Image: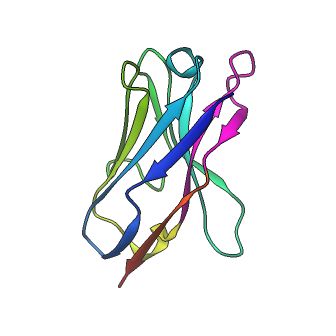
Amino acid sequence: QVQLVESGGGLVQAGESLRLSCAASGSFFSINVVAWYRQAPGKQRELVASITNGGSTNYADSVKGRFTISRDNFKRTVSLQMNSLKPEDTAVYYCALHDYYDVDRPAYWGQGTQVTVSS
């Protein structure tokens, strides 16, 4: 059984930074792709950033250069450093562990953490 627990969300002003963390339980964390998604009100959930077990990263165009994803396989954590935040970054952010065989498919989700950026 895999459980993902996010933390670090909050209310900030535009231009400020936040760091989200996700702690995982279960035996698959170190070998699967891990990712952060977000969902704004009235919008579909979208991929923000992902990282492979080897450390290769992928970012949505809207966050490139501002967000950084990282993982610690020993601690079973994944983090998202968010800098230069914009009001359009406001959303619920979810940590996800992808399927081992279908690497683009989220298999497990956290409960989400709210990020609100005021202008």
Query: In the rendered image of this protein, does residue 23 appear above or below residue 71?
Result: below
Given residues 84 and 112, the one toward you in this image is 112
Q: Quadrant of the N terminus?
A: top right
The residue drawn where x is 28% and y is 63% is 84
In magenta segment, residue 103: yes
Please report the bounds of the magenta region as a residue range.
92-110
Q: In the image, residue 68 lies at what x, y percent? A: 34, 42
Of all residues, the one furthest to the bottom in this rendering is 119
Res. 25 image quadrant: top right
Q: In the image, residue 73 lies at what x, y percent? A: 41, 20
Q: In the image, residue 5 lies at what x, y percent? A: 52, 46
Given residues 107 and 64, the one toward you in this image is 107
The residue drawn where x is 54% and y is 38% is 35
Q: Is residue 10 left or right of residue 46?
A: left
The residue drawn where x is 48% and y is 50% is 6
Q: Quadrant of the C terminus?
A: bottom left
Query: In the rendered image of this protein, does residue 100 appear above or below residue 85?
Result: above
Of all residues, the one furthest to the left in this rendering is 16
